[in-house]
Amino acid sequence: MIRHLLVAAMMALSPLTAQAQQNGGEELMVARCAQGGCRCALVDITQDDLAFLLGPDIPARAMRMTLVSVGGKTYFSPRSADEVHRAAGGTGRCEVKLFEPMTPLDGMWRSSVRVSSMSGCLPQVAEMVPPIIDDMGATVPVTWNGRFDPTKLDGGGVTRVVEWTETAPGRFKGHINIPNTGMLKVDIGLTSTLLTPERATATMHLRIGAGAGANAAALSALGMANCRTTAVYDFTRVGK
C-alpha cells in the first residue's frame, strides 16, 4: 500500500513533460493502471531518488523501465508505457497527462546526508568541509502554507543566502553568490525537489578552482585547482 501511494504521489512530480525535460535530469515513465487502460506521467527523478522512495531493491536498469501501479501492486516492467497501457485494456498510446503539483504536509521534517563525495581538495579543506555538511542536518517544524519552499527546510541557516529559482512546481535551483578572489573561484550550486507530500531531496555542489589571476599550475600542486564536493540530503516528515 505504501508503494502504491508513493507511485500516486510520483505521478504529480511532473505537471508538464516539457518542464521535466528542461530540468536536465533523468526521466522515468510511470503508469497507473486500472480496467480499461493506464494514466501515464513522465517523472524527472534519479535512480538514487527511486531507491530513497521505494527501497534499495529496485532493478539496476529501473530508469529504462516503466513503473506500473495496478490493483494495489507496484512493479517495474520492461515493457513500454504504451504496451503496458494496451495490456491493461487500453487502446492506442498511453497519453501523458497533466497533473496538479503536490502540496507538502506541515509538521516536523528531518534532514540527513545520503551521499557525499569529495575530490581534488587540499587536506585541510577535506577536513573542514564534512563538518559543515553534517551541520546542515536538523529536525525543524515546517508550516508550508500550501506550497513547497526549500528555504523552510533549513530552519534559518544557509538557505537564507541562497538565490532560489523555481524551475517547475516543486523543483528549485539555488545559487550562492560568493565574491571570487583573484586566486580562487568558488561556485556553489543547489537543487531541491519535493518527491512526495512527506519527502524531499536536495543536492549541494561546491567547486573551488583557479581564479582568473591565479597560477593554475601552482594551485594544482597545492591541491586547490579543482576541489569538488557533493552532498545529497533527504528530508522526511517525521511527525506533526
Image (cartoon, rainbow, N blue to C red):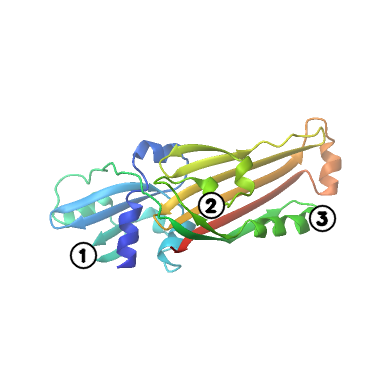
Mark before the other along the chain sequence, 3 or 2: 3
Hey, what amino acid is under mark 3? Answer: Gln
If the image is split into quadrants, where does the C terminus sit? bottom left
Residue 157 got which mark?
A: none
Label 2 sits on residue: 153
Circle 2: residue type = Leu
* Amino acid marked by disc 1: Gly
Residue 47 is at least partly visible in this image: no
Q: Pick whichever of labels 3 and 1 is earlier in the sequence.
A: 1
Label 1 residue SS: loop
**Which of the 4 image quadrants contains residue 196?**
bottom left
Query: Mark 3 — residue?
Result: 124
Residue occupying the point 67% across, 36% down: 177
Considering the numbered disc 3 on the image, is that residue within a helix, a strand or a loop?
helix
Residue under numbered circle 1: 71
User: Is residue 191 shown above or below 4?
Assistant: above
**Quadrant position of the N terminus in the picture:** bottom left
Q: Mark 2 Cα within 10 Å, few/some/many (few <14, many 20+)?
A: many
Q: Position of residue 39 (x, y in %)?
A: 23, 50
Q: Circles 2 and 1: CB distance less than 8 Å?
A: no
For discs 2 and 1, the disc positioned in front in the rendered view: 2
Label 2 SS: helix
Whole-number angstrom distance, CA of label 3 to CA of label 1: 55 Å
**Which of 2 and 81 lies nearest the eye of the viewer?**
2
